[in-house]
Image (spheres, helix red, strand yellow):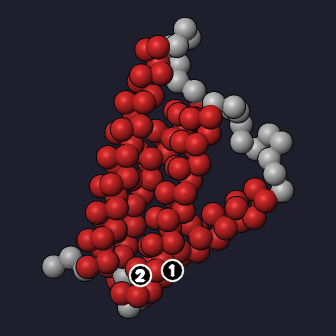
């Protein structure tokens, strides 16, 4: 039987995958309507990152399922990672929609450093929690 928190993570993997497919339609629409045949760079990045994050979320579900930590620990770690994936994709969608830049780091506000540090700590830290829970239970 699949653990409840792993089932939720898989559900979110599916939602992110559907989002990626919808973003692919947006990307295709831009490709067929622009003179150079290319979508805005951040529309392309949003589509690709959503695809990759959907599969990464599926991988996270496997670690949640096989972790030896309590459900609350696994759910919190996975939830933090998924939330940060969603925030990242949403930001790429925003940048693609606005179409004002092809590099968000160029002239970035100082607050961007805080956001990047939070992404790094949350994604890597959350996964290390799940990885150590897997190692504790399975190795």
Quarter residue 96 falls in: top right
Q: Picture coordinates of residue 8 (x, y %)?
A: 30, 70
Q: Is residue 139 visible?
A: no
From the image, tell me which residue sits under label 2.
74
Label 2 sits on a secondary structure element that is: helix
Q: Quadrant of the C terminus?
A: bottom left
Q: Quadrant of the N terminus?
A: bottom left
* Residue occupying the far bottom of the picture: 70
Using the image as rendered, state which of residue 11 and residue 138 is in the foreground. 11
Q: Residue at x 34, y 48 (%)?
A: 17
Residue 31 against residue 3 in the figure, above or below? above
Label 1 vs 2, first from the N-terminus: 2
Q: Residue at x 52, y 24 (%)?
A: 39
- Horizontal arrangement in the rendering, residue 28 relative to residue 36 (left or right): left
Q: Residue at x 34, y 68 (%)?
A: 9
From the image, tell me which residue sits under label 1.
129
- Horizontal arrangement in the rendering, residue 13 relative to residue 46 (left or right): left
Using the image as rendered, state which of residue 62 and residue 97 is in the foreground. 97
Q: Picture coordinates of residue 132 (x, y %)?
A: 48, 82
Dot 1, how many residues are within 10 Å of its Cα: few (below 14), some (14-19), or many (20+)?
many
Q: Residue at x 51, y 72 (%)?
A: 80
Label 1 sits on a secondary structure element that is: helix
Q: Picture coordinates of residue 71 (x, y %)?
A: 36, 87
How many numbered marks have been drawn onto this rendered protein structure? Answer: 2
**Are the two marked residues, 1 and 2, in contact with CB atoms closer than 8 angstroms?**
yes
Residue 36 against residue 60 in the figure, above or below? above
Dot 2, how many residues are within 10 Å of its Cα: few (below 14), some (14-19), or many (20+)?
many
């Amino acid at each position: 039987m699949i653990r409840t928190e792993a089932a939720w993570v898989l559900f979110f993997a599916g939602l992110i995958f559907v989002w990626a497919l919808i973003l692919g339609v947006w990307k295709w629409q831009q490709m067929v309507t622009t003179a150079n045949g290319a979508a805005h760079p951040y529309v392309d990045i949003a589509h690709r990152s959503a695809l990759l994050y959907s599969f990464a979320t599926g991988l996270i579900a496997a670690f949640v399922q096989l972790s030896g930590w309590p459900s609350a620990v696994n759910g919190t770690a996975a939830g933090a990672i998924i939330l940060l994936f969603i925030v990242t994709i949403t930001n790429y969608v925003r940048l693609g929609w606005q179409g004002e830049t092809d590099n968000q780091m160029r002239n970035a506000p100082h607050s961007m450093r805080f956001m990047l540090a939070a992404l790094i700590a949350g994604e890597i830290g959350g996964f290390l929690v799940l990885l150590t829970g897997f190692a504790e239970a399975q190795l």
